[in-house]
């Protein structure tokens, strides 16, 4: 029982210990993908600005169009003046040039390119505004009740909001609905012209079993990451929103996934540690105990555990260990695409 308590306390503390994080921006969620069971939840239904996580829905619509034959991977799309004028992050596409659907996909996944997102939106819907309306309609169909999109890129708009829970739902949909195209999220990077663009998502690049999904940042939102990993036949989806830095964001997602897999490894611990309620049953989400005395005891115990871990664990050390163990992921994409 003490071991069970330690796991529960550790997961709880990971997302409450960093007092400098703005609570109005932070949120976290960890689910077991196959069942939707919630393993950890913090502010998961509170609305947040999605930043470039928005591109996950843009990509969902692209994958759907590819499956239906409405788009082709080698199809060339024209870059408009609006698309060429998008701010960073971008590919630097020039007005009246073209980019293939395939390269636009990789640009959004690896570079989080805003100009590529607008090119896709205009090609598929005539305008970015019309495309954003479709994004919101599809979000509702998927059960993303608290999400509203206003653009295809994630550039800040005060009316563009989502939740950690909705991002987990979208992640699950991408994995289940488009398994062929979901593999694209594993790419380590891609070459376009004379430049190579590495994937921003360290879960896809370095985490053992990790194969996607997406990072995001704007000033108003803080640093986001949605990551998924699969070990021993079990897939977890983690969402971390509103952190203060890239390092803090990445440490959180690594530790969150580590804690989830540690709990899943032993079924006895799983039954007593994890919330049995599925993600998709409204009102079933479990939160930390309200009892003030128990809350204080958990915080004290959790702080001791965290201090022990922080003495030995850092993201840099974790990445170095994985390099030594030769488990750095390589791109698993084989589309026979042309060299640039």
Image (cartoon, grey):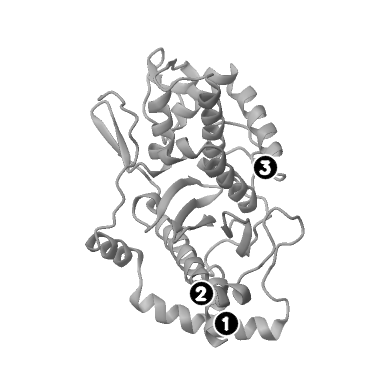
Q: Residue at x 62, y 73 (%)?
A: 271
Query: To which residue does mark 3 refer?
Result: 147
Element at label 3: loop
Can you say whether 106 is above or below 96 in the image?
A: below
Q: Nearer the viewer, residue 339 or 88?
A: 339
User: Residue 96 vs residue 293: left or right?
Assistant: left
Q: Residue at x 31, y 63 (%)?
A: 316
Asked whether the residues under the numbered discs 2 and 3 touch, taking CB atoms below 8 Å apart as contact, a structural biologist would say no
The image position of residue 114, as x and y in percent, is 46, 32
Question: Mark 2 against mark 3, which lies toward the viewer?
Answer: 2
Alpha carbons under labels 2 and 3: distance apart? 35 Å
Crowding around mark 1 (Cα neighbors within 10 Å: few <14, some 14 to 19, many 20+) is some
- Farthest residue in the top direction? 96
Q: Nearer the viewer, residue 216 or 262?
A: 262
Crowding around mark 2 (Cα neighbors within 10 Å: few <14, some 14 to 19, many 20+) is few
Element at label 1: helix
Does residue 155 appear anywhere in the picture?
A: no
Alpha carbons under labels 2 and 1: distance apart? 14 Å
Query: To which residue does mark 2 refer?
Result: 266
On residue 5, which mark appears? 1
The image position of residue 256, as x and y in percent, is 49, 64
Crowding around mark 3 (Cα neighbors within 10 Å: few <14, some 14 to 19, many 20+) is many
User: Residue 99 vs residue 80: left or right?
Assistant: left
Q: Which of the image's four quarters has the C terminus?
A: top left
Asked whether the residues under the numbered discs 3 and 1 touch, taking CB atoms below 8 Å apart as contact, a structural biologist would say no
The image position of residue 69, as x and y in percent, is 52, 20
């Amino acid at each position: 029982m003490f071991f069970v308590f330690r796991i529960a306390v550790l997961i709880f503390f990971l997302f409450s210990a960093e007092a400098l994080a703005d609570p109005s921006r932070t949120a976290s969620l960890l689910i077991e993908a196959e069942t939707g069971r919630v393993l950890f939840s913090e502010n998961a239904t509170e609305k947040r600005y999605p930043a470039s996580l928005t591109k996950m829905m843009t990509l969902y619509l692209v994958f759907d169009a590819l499956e239906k034959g409405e788009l082709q991977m080698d199809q060339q799309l024209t870059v408009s003046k609006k698309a060429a004028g998008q701010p960073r992050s971008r590919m630097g596409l020039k007005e009246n040039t073209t980019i293939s659907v395939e390269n636009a996909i990789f640009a959004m996944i690896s570079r989080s390119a805003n100009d590529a997102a607008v090119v896709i939106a205009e090609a598929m819907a005539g305008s970015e505004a019309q495309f954003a309306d479709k994004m919101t309609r599809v979000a509702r169909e998927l059960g993303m009740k608290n999400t509203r999109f206003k653009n295809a890129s994630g550039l800040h708009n005060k009316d563009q909001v989502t939740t950690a829970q909705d991002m987990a739902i979208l992640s699950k949909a991408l994995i289940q609905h488009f398994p062929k195209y979901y593999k694209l999220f594993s790419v380590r990077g891609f070459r376009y012209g004379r430049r190579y663009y590495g994937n921003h998502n360290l879960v896809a690049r370095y985490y053992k079993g990790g194969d996607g999904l997406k990072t995001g940042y704007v000033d108003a939102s803080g640093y986001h990451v949605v990551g998924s990993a699969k070990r021993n036949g079990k897939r977890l989806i983690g969402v971390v929103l509103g952190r203060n830095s890239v390092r803090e964001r990445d440490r959180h997602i690594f530790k969150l996934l580590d804690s989830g897999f540690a709990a899943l490894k032993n079924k006895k611990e799983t039954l007593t540690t994890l919330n049995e309620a599925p993600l998709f049953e409204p009102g079933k989400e479990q939160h930390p105990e309200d009892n003030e005395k128990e809350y204080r005891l958990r915080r004290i115990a959790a702080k001791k555990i965290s201090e022990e871990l922080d003495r030995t664990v850092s993201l840099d050390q974790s990445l170095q260990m994985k390099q030594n163990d030769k488990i750095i992921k390589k791109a698993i994409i084989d589309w026979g695409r042309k060299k640039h």
